[in-house]
Amino acid sequence: MPTQQAPCLVLGGGGFLGTTICRRLARTGRPVRAFGRARRFPAAMDGIDWREGDFADAASVATAIDGCEIVYHLV
């Protein structure tokens, strides 16, 4: 039986580069979580687990990272 992969996280996932990376990762079948202050392209983020927060808030960053195996830092 296949095991569920842990999601990867894109910090700064709401901008142009972050959205592009999230979409590419999602196409591989791996769960994707994005973290940022705002989604600039919300329609492009369908199927992406969006977490709103500020990178300066260590607690929200820690919560976003929890359970992720890979973190892409674009902040």
Image: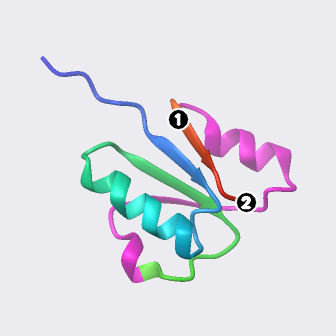
**Type of amino acid at the residue the image marks with label 2:** Val
Residue at image point 52% right, 35% down: 70
Closest to the observer, 21 or 63: 21
**Type of amino acid at the residue the image marks with label 1:** Ile
- The alpha-carbon separation of the residues under discs 1 and 2 comes to 15 Å
Residue at image point 36% right, 63% down: 23
Q: Is residue 58 magenta?
A: yes
Looking at the picture, how far across and down is residue 32, in whole percent? 42, 50
The residue carrying mark 2 is 75
What's the magenta region? 43-67
Dot 1, how many residues are within 10 Å of its Cα: few (below 14), some (14-19), or many (20+)? few
Which of the 4 quarters of the picture holds residue 43? bottom left
Confirm or deny contact between disc 1 and disc 2 (CB under 8 A). no
Looking at the picture, how far across and down is residue 22, in whole percent? 43, 59
Could you tell me which quadrant the N terminus lies in? top left
From this viewpoint, is residue 68 visible?
no
